[in-house]
């Protein structure tokens, strides 16, 4: 099982490097496909639990990821004019109207719970994943976007090994029976170290203007915490809808949503930290 | 019953005029209280149906209405600096994290359905009501904000009387057994006439730069349609959670959410029409 996981992870990482290095538009398109897949898995798990999410609304929302990415690449184009605070507000309003139409005109088939789960899913998946694209769109975003993945993967990996070697005290048996306090702490420390090392590389290579090292530490600690919250959040949903994994696209890792559960949360943290604090 | 309704409506309208005329900050504060009350009613109806919305998150979200209103009045103040696209995105992200914390750390008490209903409620109530404040913040907003109320009330009233006199064909028996096609059409026509008359007053009084009359007609038609969608949306929720009214604060009209169900939807329509088209 560990062997499958490792091989699968290696393939995933190679794919990720290839995608990120292929440029902004390829990354945006890849994030779009991930969001579609994650949305599919989220909806499927809800459907299995007896709910009726409005799938079309969820899938259409994923187009926002493409818009965000392409509008930045194709400067001054049609796309870019569309993207603004006001059109974002309008899109949310339109989504509310469309969702309500389902419980009005298809009353009996859909109810307020179904449309709320759909609406929440759009924010949980499309909205959070958009921060990968937003981070990539920042100045030196090509270099900074890695922090999102390094943050999530180093936490995952270090939490796993810290738990394996030092794990004694159960953390949250109701959701993830195997998680330990020692694992969680190890995840945060591991993440801080990993982002620090990446910061060392960035500063030494001279590819960015110098950023004080404590920023990378702080980002690492924040990512180490939020990354695990992302992990537990997905577990809490899975436990409620009674599935072990959201999917099976990555052998040993489950579905796209299982693999991206932490990234969903590290992406906004990295984005806000970079654009507000640094 | 009709007498109670009329007296109650008159008191409401006088109160509304007093509030809107008392200026921006009073209106913002009033919208804040309405959003708190509507949130309370929404949560209570869900609780009665067996769900456990995260009430604190809903109530805290209402502060956004105050922020929006006061930041505009107290120019260059602390509030105004806080309000931006980025802080809006951050607030949504923070809300997602907080809500997930409830299903992680209080697993068994709360679940994904509860937090989705809470999240949707914040957008249904706080977000939609904010458009009253946003419209008031527009240039000549003091005059334009009336379109929101005129749009909703004229539709309601005209739909009621058209239905009473001409109603034959049932519109949506599953949600609102008394609603008729004739009533709905009458509502739209009545709304278009009312907004046209208000436009006539605005143009003739010279209090605004001239706006072609067809804009008032179009706004009226849009408000007449969306206003009824708002009405039916609230009915669909009420039918699902099995309550007749959300509350009883206005004799003959029900609760705040019963009275504002249409306004929730006319507010964004008026705002987007004014700020995009005119």
Image (cartoon, coloured by chain):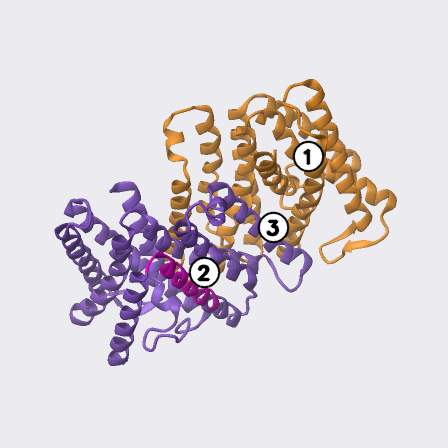
Chain colours: A orange, B purple
Q: In this view, does B257 lie above or below A257?
A: below
Disc 3 sits on a residue from what chain? Answer: B
Instruction: Write the residue at 66% across / 63% down.
Output: B108
In magenta, the rendered stretch is B23-40
Q: Which mark is nearer the camera, 3 or 2?
A: 3
Q: What is the crowding at mark 1: few (fewer than 14 residues within 10 Å), some, or many (at least 20)?
A: some
Give the left or right position of residue B121, taking residue B225 as reference.
right
Q: Is residue B87 above or below residue A49?
A: above
Q: Identify the residue under disc 3.
A: B97
Q: What element carries label 2?
A: loop
Q: Identify the residue under disc 1.
A: A215
Percent x, y for residue A44? 56, 48
Q: What element carries label 3?
A: helix
The CA span between labels 3 and 1 is 22 Å
Q: Identify the residue under disc 2.
A: A111
Query: Of callouts 1 and 2, which one flags the residue occurring earlier in the amino acid sequence?
Result: 2
Instruction: Write the residue at 46% across / 50% down.
Output: A54
Instruction: Write the residue at 53% across / 33% down.
Output: A134
């Amino acid at each position: 099982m560990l062997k499958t996981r490792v091989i699968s992870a290696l393939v995933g990482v190679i794919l990720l490097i290839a995608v990120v290095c292929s440029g902004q538009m390829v990354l945006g398109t890849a994030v779009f496909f991930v969001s579609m897949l994650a949305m599919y898995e989220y909806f499927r798990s809800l459907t299995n639990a007896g709910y009726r999410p409005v799938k079309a609304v969820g899938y259409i929302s994923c187009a926002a990821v493409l818009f965000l990415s392409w509008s930045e690449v194709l400067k001054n184009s049609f796309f870019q004019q569309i993207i603004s605070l006001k059109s974002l507000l309008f899109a949310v309003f339109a989504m509310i109207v469309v969702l309500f139409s389902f419980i009005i005109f298809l009353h009996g088939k859909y109810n307020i719970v179904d449309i709320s789960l759909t609406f929440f899913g759009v924010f949980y998946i499309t909205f959070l994943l958009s921060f990968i694209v937003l981070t990539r769109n920042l100045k030196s975003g090509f270099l900074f976007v890695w922090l999102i993945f390094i943050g999530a993967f180093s936490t995952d990996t270090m939490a796993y090994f810290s738990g394996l070697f030092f794990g004694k005290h159960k953390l949250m048996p109701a959701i993830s029976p195997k998680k330990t306090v020692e694992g969680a702490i190890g995840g945060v420390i591991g993440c801080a170290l990993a982002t620090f090392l990446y910061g060392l590389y960035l500063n030494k290579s001279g590819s960015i203007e110098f950023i004080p090292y404590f920023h990378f530490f702080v980002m690492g600690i924040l990512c180490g915490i939020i990354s695990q919250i992302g992990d537990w959040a997905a577990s809490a949903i899975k436990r409620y809808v009674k599935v072990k994994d959201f999917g099976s696209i990555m052998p040993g890792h489950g579905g796209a949503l299982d693999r991206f559960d932490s990234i969903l949360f590290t992406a906004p943290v990295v984005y806000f930290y970079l654009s507000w604090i640094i």
